[in-house]
Image (tube, coloured by chain):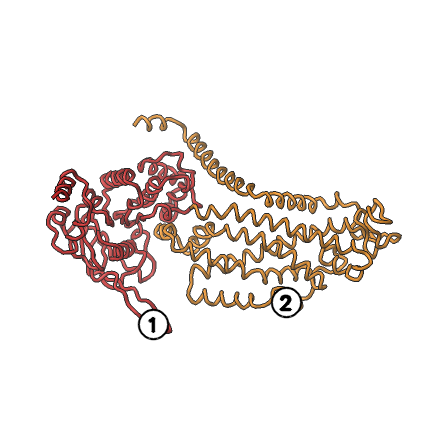
Amino acid sequence: MSNVSTTEPRPKGAVAEKLASESRNATKAMLVEFWYYFSQNRGAVIGLTVFLALVVIALLAPYVAPHSPDMQYRDSFLQPPAWGEGGSATFLLGTDAVGRDILSRLIYGSRYSLFIGVVVVVIALSGGIVLGVIAGYFGGSVDTLIMRVMDIILAFPSLLLALVLVAILGPGLTNAMIAIAIVLQPHFVRLTRAAVLSERNRDYVVAARLAGSGNLRLMFKTILPNCLSPLIVQATLSFSNAILDAAALGFLGMGAQPPTPEWGTMLAEAREFILRAWWVVTFPGLAILITVLAINLVGDGLRDALDPKLKRS
Amino acid sequence: MSGDVILKVRDLKRDYVTKGGLFKKESTLSALKGVSFDVERGSTLAVVGESGCGKSTLARILTMIDPATAGTVEIDGAMIDISKGKISRELRQKVQIVFQNPYGSLNPRQKIGAVLEEPLLLNSDKSPAERRDLALAMLEKVGLKPEHYGRYPHMFSGGQRQRIAIARAIMLQPKLLVLDEPVSALDLSVQAQILNLLADLQDEFNLTYVFISHDLSVVRYIADKVMVMYFGEAVEYGTRDEVFSDPKHSYTKTLFAATPRADIESIRARLARKAA
């Protein structure tokens, strides 16, 4: 009983403070562990660095870009990059057919790409989670209905479906994003449903039900947090997919409209100069490649870091 | 004496129907074929049987997870029937369960404090500070420390997790606790600790236990009454001493014969048999 006598005279605030710090330590320990497994994968760390650099560039675009993305320099059409024959240090990566600086346009374009990725993933993820949790949790005819609709969406070639949707909604960046989100959504629904199905009958869910949790609380508070790992991985991969699809739509003239410095749209505008001026297509293409590669590497690392945790619990 | 009976089960049946498909007929599996028993307040009924004999089905019906096909269950004077609508708060507070596997029964993303407070949050109107104090008091009662309050389940050993599961189950001060093989996933020394903890808690809260097990030595230690089940039927039901000293049914006899004995007398007898 000596234990009780030492703890009782202590003021209540001190106990609460101690508990709070202990709780913070537990959270911190989880994060440290996560970072340990993530940093084991060198590619993932490189990918994360590139991605963070991209985010910084996108945020600071007006300060980083040497020129305005829409400024046309009439005396230097299709000027090669600085190291090429006839290039100048004013336009590091050269200019396009109407004399705009490609580097500045790429820098401003990164804003669009990241914006597209974020918006598409948020729409697809939230819709996919809600539908997937409902399908997995309730099962039966609700499940069948939702999953068959998703199967139908999956049966279309994704880009073709996105094209059709854009054709219905009208061309433009917003509509392209909505279309891509709808195309990517079934993957999230399937993944969520599968995870919910495997968690639904675990003992801790039954225990929470016995404690009096209602359906909503069980679905989103008890089960969902345990299904997040595969979803996070899928979200990163979809992020890069969204950028690719948006670029493809832009290339086909259905996405962002000129003169928006979106990477895919830039490629589309440069189509006719592919043979004469290699830099107008190469650099936007490289930008897409590097971004998508970096994000995919991060997704790979996330999978490594999150998966063993699932097995351990 | 009948006023002391807290759990009254009469003729309980449960059928599982497997849906017929294209090439097979619909078939019915009777997991429970009419089980009746009484449990008195503050006592322990041990349910023993091989796997697949309906023990866990019984536990799920008693804890209102699954409905019964036929028969009645009366807990503390109230009939339970979950086929009609939701269970009321008061009823829920009467029965709780502790599961066999301490690794699956705690939400990996929920800190221990939240685990213990969840039943209170959902079933009472206590303030956060009150809930925390109750949770801390309960942690101490089951032999854990206050600093465990903010930790995640994966930071605990199996025995500690089972203590947490027990603490969660008695947070609502239930009258009846169903223990579904609570110690069979633990090693021997931890088993003894958990069994002692359960005995202490039973004295303190006047709990009634329905203890499901296949381990006869554990049953002999904790039970007041024993029910032996065999293929969905209660083949033997009586006080511990009755059942252990004078088993009536042939299955019970086989079961006792199959239990390895480690006391010196029986080892000597076995060696003597071997030498002969």
Q: Secondary structure at mark 1?
A: loop
Tag 2 and tag 1 share a subunit: no
Specify few, some or many for label 1: CA neighbours under 10 Å numbering under 14, 14-19, or 20 or more.
few
Q: What color is chain B drawn in? A: red
Residue B263 left/right relative to A2 = left
Residue occupying image coordinates x 15% and y 44%: B274
Quadrant containing the N terminus of chain A is top left
Residue A299 in percent (x, y) is at 57, 50
Q: Residue at x 33, y 26 (%)?
A: A5
Crowd class of label 2 (few under 14; some 14 to 19; many from 20; radius 10 Å): few
Can you identify the residue that label 2 sits on? A160
- Direction from residue B258 to residue A85 in the image, left or right: right
For residue B71, above or below residue B187: below
Residue B147 x %, y %: 40, 34
The residue wearing badge 1 is B24
Instruction: Check the residue under mark 1 and report the chain it is in.
Output: B
In this view of the protein, can residue A226 be seen by the observer? yes
Residue A198 in the figure: left or right of residue A153: left
In the picture, which chain is orange? A
Q: Locate residue A120, reporting x and y percent.
A: 61, 56
Left or right, A287 with reference to B215: right
Label 2 resides on the chain identified as A
Q: Nearer the viewer, mark 2 or mark 1?
A: 1
Amino acid beneath label 1: Lys
Which residue is farthest right?
A75
Q: CA distance from mark 2 to mark 1?
A: 42 Å
Farthest bottom residue in view: B22
Q: Secondary structure at mark 2?
A: helix
Q: Nearer the viewer, residue B17 or A118?
A: B17
